[in-house]
Image (tube, rainbow, N blue to C red):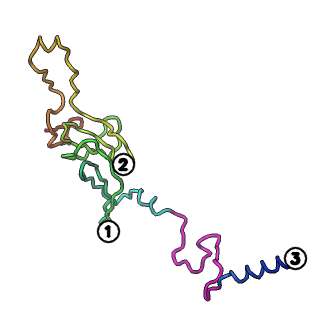
Amino acid sequence: MDVEKRQEKDDQEDDENDIFIPGVGPIAMHASNRDDPLLEIKDDGEDSDAEDYFIRPDDNLIVAAHVEDDTSSLEVYIYNDKEGYLYVHHDILMLHMPLCLTWLDYDTNNSNTVNYVAVGSMEGAIEIFDVDLVDQMEPMHTFAKKSQKKKSKSSKNSSKKANKSSEGHDAAVLDLTWNKLVRQIFASS
């Protein structure tokens, strides 16, 4: 009998420890958000971010260079005048600080129209990026002055003149332009 009395006391203590809060009932669980009568916004099952990655025919692309502290990037914006929206579609991190940009729509290997941007930098490099690619880590092409190899001691003694190269820029790339008549020519200053 002692065991039965102990169980009855335990049951009575459990009942006393239950806290009753007026107006609060058990939590209602629903299989999906559509079944919940209190939820005003119904879950469509579609991710709205996926729609933001789709570029519509009436959307315009705007590419802007962005520099903040030691970080520089290209920001690709989507602008639609009819719908009235402007947002950053994606950004491209840059190694060098960009000074000038120009849009290119010509690829020598492809007859289709493309969206490339050429970027001139402080370090004298010209980098070409594909604006349509999201999360690219490196430029498609880089045009830069070839780094000169260290000269040996014997070559330093024999020639005091510096080897000047006509390839690439010695200083910052200040301007870029694409020749519209002869599509293979690209000019920089």
Of tags 2 and 3, which is closer to the observer?
3
Q: Earlier in the sequence, mark 1 or mark 2?
A: 1
Residue type at mark 2?
A: Asp
Label 1 neighbour load within 10 Å: few <14, some 14-19, many 20+: few
| Most frequent secondary structure within the magenta stretch | loop
Answer with mark 3 or mark 1, whichever residue precedes in sequence: 3
Quadrant placement of the N terminus: bottom right
Is 40 left or right of 53, judged from the image as shown?
Answer: right
- The front one of 115 and 39 is 39
CA separation in Å, label 1 and label 2:
22 Å
In percent of width and height, residue 150 lies at 21, 20
| Mark 3 to mark 1 CA distance (whole Å) | 79 Å
**Residue at 61% across, 84% down:** 24
> In the image, what residue occupies the spot 37% across and 42% down?
137
Q: Regarding mark 2 in the picture, which secondary structure is present there? A: loop
Q: In terms of depth relative to the viewer, which is nearer, 170 or 51?
A: 170
Give how far across and how far down residue 50 sits, in percent: 46, 58
Q: Is residue 80 above or below residue 134?
A: below
Residue bearing the label numbered 2? 132
In this rendering, position of residue 78 left or right of residue 155:
right
Query: Which comes sooner in the sequence, label 2 or label 3?
Result: 3
Q: Quadrant of the C terminus?
A: top left
Name the residue rendered at 34%, 35% in the picture: 109
In magenta, the rendered stretch is 20-46
**Is disc 3 surrounded by few (<14), some (14 to 19) or many (20+) residues within 10 Å?**
few
Occupied quadrant, residue 147: top left
Residue indicated by mark 3: 2
Residue 23 drawn in magenta: yes
Q: Amino acid at mark 3?
A: Asp
Query: Which quadrant of the view contains residue 116?
Result: top left
Q: Which mark is residue 84?
A: 1
